[in-house]
Image: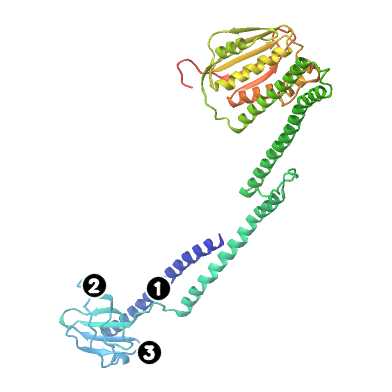
Amino acid sequence: MTLTAALVALVLWTALCAVLLALVRQEAISETVRGLARDGRRVATAINTGTLSRPIQAPDGELLQVTDLQDRVLAASPRMLGRAPVAFPPPPVDDDRRDGRSCEVDAPGGGCFLLVEYQVGLGPSAKLVYSLAPRPGLLPHPLTAALIALSIPFITGLVGYGTWLAAGRTLRPVGEIRRELDEITATDLERRVPVPGRRDEVGMLAESVNATLDRLERAVARQRGFVTDVSHELRSPLTALRMEVELALAAPEDSDVPEMLRAVLENVERLSAVVDDLLALARLEADRSFAREPVDLTEVTDAEVLRRPRRTQVTVLSEGSVTVHGGRSELSRLVTNLLDNADRHAVAEVTVILRAEPPATAVVEVIDDGPGIAPADRERVFERFTRLAEGRHRDAGGTGLGLAISRDIAQAHGGSLVLTDRIDGETGARFVLRLPRVSAGRPP
């Protein structure tokens, strides 16, 4: 940044200095022409009044010459005595003065000269007055030019140093943020980067980094808790399996082989259910861009109800086809989880209501006649591996992941899943699923 600013300042200031030098030279030329015009008018006035001296009085060494129209020198200043007449066109017919430049004049100093020419009188007796001076060079004022040239490295260095200070002051918080991030590890995620006092891009960057660290800390804490819960859930069936096998090995003659195998199969099914749910969670978290298609929730619900028998009676009430755009297998799993959960907690009956809610929402209600869930615990049931103490004996076959998976599937489809009271005032739980609906004739 400093180098770029210095290079830009160098280019711009150099161009500005070149313009200044050009203006200084132009001013020197204009001043010289004004001086020549004064000298020429003085000589012309002397001719008109008949007081012209020969040689022409030029106390400051001016170069003056008077000729007639036949190019005969009539008078000259001391430094122009003996010189050839100035070769320069006469003034135009409508003016008595001509300014110009000539490099073919015989005058002291050589090179090119600036000329101011006056015509005095009319007709053949007219006279031409020439006032000339060497044309100013590229640097008519060397001291001024030197000061302007010296200002180039000075201004460049000043801009570079100022940019370096400003950039350093601006980026210093970035360095502190980087050092703090380098020291943060997975064991001290509670640390945060310093936030500068000023509200600028760096300050907003620090706030974004801290917000990211907050999310990372929550994710790591959730992951650690998840690993702990998984270990606990897997330990129970594995311990039961080990116990059954050890008992059979310790006393093979006393073992009831069919009973032992049934117990082993039950624990294997429990392990398989936990693993299946874990795989479903992993797929949802890793990739939510699963294949989607129009899915009739009424058809899916009927299929899941008929797929296998349940402990209670399941009644499906539908107003007709309720279509959403989503993954068929994911939505089938969501409905199955809700039905299984209601079946485990219901006393005798589970009711499923499907309806369309204006303007474009599909609603699925799964209602059981069980003991219900207290309002304080209605969000807890959607946490992973959460099984309420009062319902553990009813939920012995569950993994504690079904409702968490169901809510994740609903959110992946842009919907919601909540637990509320039954609207008829009876005891029981009422799960309400809302998903964006696909209207008839409208593409998803």
Dot label at residue 59: 3
Of discs 1 and 3, which sits in the foreground? 1
Q: Residue furthest left?
A: 124
Q: Amino acid at mark 1?
A: Glu
For the question of whether residue 71 can be seen, the reply is yes
| Disc 1 from disc 3: Cα separation | 24 Å
| Disc 3 from disc 2: Cα separation | 29 Å
Q: What residue is at 56 percent from the left and 62 percent from the top?
A: 2
Q: Earlier in the sequence, mark 3 or mark 2?
A: 3
**Circle 3 sits in a helix, a strand or a loop, which is it?**
loop
Dot label at residue 27: 1
Depth order, front residue of 280/94: 280
Depth order, front residue of 320/176: 320
Q: Residues within 10 Å of mark 1 (few under 14, many from 20)?
A: few
Q: Earlier in the sequence, mark 1 or mark 3?
A: 1
The quadrant in which residue 19 appears is bottom left
Q: What residue is at 66 percent from the left and 13 percent from the top?
A: 366
Q: Are marks 1 and 3 in contact (CB under 8 Å)?
A: no
Q: Establish if 275 lies above or below 4.
A: above
Q: Earlier in the sequence, mark 1 or mark 2?
A: 1
Q: Amino acid at mark 2?
A: Asp
The residue that mark 2 highlights is: 95
| Disc 1 from disc 2: Cα separation | 25 Å
Q: Position of residue 420 (x, y in %)?
A: 70, 16
Q: Amino acid at mark 3?
A: Pro
Q: Position of residue 261 (x, y in %)?
A: 74, 18
User: Left of 427 or right of it: where is 149?
Assistant: left
Q: Position of residue 256 (x, y in %)?
A: 79, 15
For the question of whether residue 396 can be seen, the reply is no
